[in-house]
Image (cartoon, coloured by chain):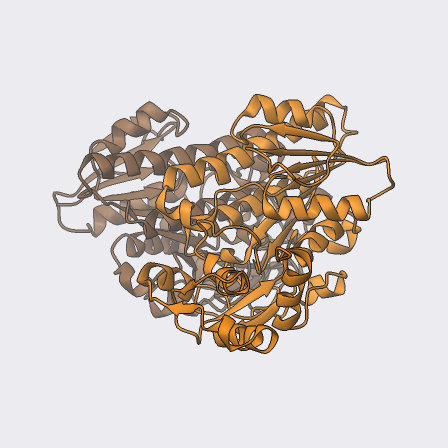
Chain colours: A orange, B brown
Amino acid sequence: MTSILIIGGGGMVGQKLSHALAATPLTGPDDAVTLFDLGFAENGAPATTRVTGNVTDDALVASLVAKRPDVIFHLASIVSGEAETDFDLGWTVNGRAFWNFLETVRAEHMASGGIYRPRVVFTSSIAVFGAPYPDKIDDTFLCAPQTSYGAQKAISELMLSDFSRKGFLDGLSIRLPTICVRPGKPNKAASSFFSGIIREPLNGHEAILPVTSDVRHWHASPRAAARFLRHAGTIDLEQVGSRRALNLPGVSCTVEEQIEALREIAGNDVVALIKHQPDAAVAKIVAGWPRDFAPERAKALGFRAESNFHDIINTYIEEDLPKS
Amino acid sequence: MTSILIIGGGGMVGQKLSHALAATPLTGPDDAVTLFDLGFAENGAPATTRVTGNVTDDALVASLVAKRPDVIFHLASIVSGEAETDFDLGWTVNGRAFWNFLETVRAEHMASGGIYRPRVVFTSSIAVFGAPYPDKIDDTFLCAPQTSYGAQKAISELMLSDFSRKGFLDGLSIRLPTICVRPGKPNKAASSFFSGIIREPLNGHEAILPVTSDVRHWHASPRAAARFLRHAGTIDLEQVGSRRALNLPGVSCTVEEQIEALREIAGNDVVALIKHQPDAAVAKIVAGWPRDFAPERAKALGFRAESNFHDIINTYIEEDLPKS
C-alpha cells in the first residue's frame, strides 16, 4: 500500500495523473491518493481524499506532510503568463511556498529520526531554458530562463536537488514539454494557444493564433505527462544520480505542422476556424522558448512520449473531446 | 561621483576591492565607498564609511539601500565548508538574506518611481557546477551543484537575473575561480588548502595537503578578483545580454604544478613544509569541483586573470607576504 499526495491535484495534469494511478496503481488497489488544490471539478478525478486549500498555507501543507505520504507529486504553480504579470504572486507561490514545502518535509524527516524520506516528484518546465539555443538542447545545456516562471522552476529544481543530496527526501524534477492538447478552457499560460488552435476548432469554435506558423515548439500530451509523473514516482533514483532534473521526451514541430496534422485528421473546414491575430507580447515570450531536445537521459530511464503530432491530436480526440 | 556599497566589505576580497577602488576610482576622487560587514580588521582597507552588522538584519540592509548607492558589490556569504555542515545557516544567509536584499532594492526602485536602478555585482562561484565535466567547461554548461553553497550561489544568480530582466536593478553574477593565494589565516572553505600549501610554507610554517597532488583546479589571485569586480561594476551590460552569470578567466593547474611553481620560486626547503595528510571529507568535496574552463564570453568582455601559477604566487609575494 502506497500513500500518495498530489499537490495541485485539481488541475488538468493532476486529474490525468489521478486517473492513471486509479487505472494502474503504484502498488495495488489499496493505494491511498490525496488530492490537494484550490478547488476541484464536480466530476473530478478519483481520489481517497480531497483537501481544499492554498499551497501558501504553511500549516495546512504541514498537516498533509505530517501524514507521511510515501510519494508526493508537486504540480501546483502560478502559470507562466500570470507569474510574468504578477511578480509578487509568482515568487510567493512558485518560490517561497515551494521552499516552505521542502522545509516541512525536512522537519518531518527529522521528527521521524531520519526514517521518513518520501519520493518527491516536481513538475518543472522547459521554461528553465532561454535563447539562444543549439538545434537540439542536450542534457548538459544551461538553464537561462527568460521569464520569472522559468527562474522559479529552475530555483525549485536546485532546492529539491540539494534537499535530496542531503537525504531529507528523494526528489526528481521533470521538465515537462508544453502539454498539448489541453482539454477545457484556455488558461493564462502564454503557451495556451498551442492547444487552443487544435482544441477549439475540433469543438467547432474559432481559435486565435497569436504567432507566425513557423514557430517550432516541444509538445507532449496530457496522457504522456501523467505517464511521465507515474514513472518518476517509481523509478530507481540511484540510476538518475546526482543531477535530479530531467529533460523529457516530446514531439518537436512547427505550428504549421500542427495545423497540417489537424487538417489531415479533421479536414479543411475545421482548420478554417483558426484565425491568425498577431500578439506581440505572446510572440516575444514564445520566441525565447525551446524548439527541440535530445533528451537521452530520460529516454534511457524509460520515459516515453508520443512520436508525432498526429498521435497527440488523436490522444485528445480519444480522451478529452466531448462526445457529440 | 559614484557611491559604492560593498556588502561583505570586511572580507579578504572586499578589502582587495576597496584598495583597488581607492587606487583607481570608478569615477573620481570623490567616490564614496561604504563597507558593510560583521567586523573589520584594525588596519583595514580604505573606506568613506564602515557599517558593522549582519546581512540577515533586513532593517539595516534596507537603511543602506535607502541611501541609493549607484553600485552595490555583494560579496557576503557563508563559505562552502560551513554551508555544508550548517544547512540552516547556509540557506538563511546565502539564500533568504540575498532574496531579501533583492526585494529591498526592488522596493527602493519602486519608491523612486523607477529611477533608482543600481548596478549589482554578485560574487558567485564555480561551485555552481558539478561533475561529470567536459575537459573544459564552456559558457553553456549546466549548473549542477553538489554542495549547498553551490546551490545557493546558482539560485542567487537566477534571482539576480530575473530582477535585472524586470528592470528593478542591473545585475551581473561573476563566478570567481578559487581565490589563491589567500592572505591571512585558513578559513572554513573546503578550498582553503589550495592557498595554504603556498602561503604557509612561504611564511615558514607547515601546511597540510588533504588531497592527492593530481587534483586539477581553477585559480585566480585576490588581485585578479578585485579587478574582475571593478570591471563588472562598470562594463556595459547591454553587451552581456540576458545571460547574467559569467564564467571568469583563471589558471588551470594541478596541485603538483602548484608545488613545482613554489619550488622554482622559493626552493626545496620551503616545499618540504607541505605535509600530505589525506582528508576524505575534503577530497570528496573537491573531487566534484571543476578543473578547467573556456570562459570565452568573459574574455570577450575584457575580464583578465593571470596566465600561469607562477604569476599567482608572485602576486602573493608582492601584495601580501609579510615583509621580514
The image shows residue A166, relative to residue A260, as above or below, that is above
Total numbered badges shown on the rendered structure: 0
Residue A114 coordinates in the image, percent (x, y) = 76, 28
Residue A41 coordinates in the image, percent (x, y) = 60, 38
The answer to whether residue A85 is left or right of residue A176 is: left
The image shows residue B316, relative to residue A297, as above or below, that is above
Residue B261 coordinates in the image, percent (x, y) = 53, 62
Residue A173 coordinates in the image, percent (x, y) = 63, 49
The answer to whether residue B45 is left or right of residue A7 is: left
Q: Residue furthest front?
A: A324
The image shows residue A313, relative to residue B274, as above or below, that is below
Residue placed most toward the observer, B242 or B239? B242
Q: Quadrant of the C terminus of chain B?
A: top left
Q: Is residue B210 visible?
A: no
Please name the residue shown 46% across and 39% down the image: B184
Residue placed most toward the observer, B166 or B202? B166
Residue placed most toward the observer, A235 or A26? A26
Residue placed most toward the observer, B136 or A159? A159
Please name the residue shown 35% across and 46% down the image: A85
Q: Quadrant of the N terminus of chain B?
A: top left
Please name the residue shown 51% across and 74% down the image: A259
Q: Is residue A22 visible?
A: yes
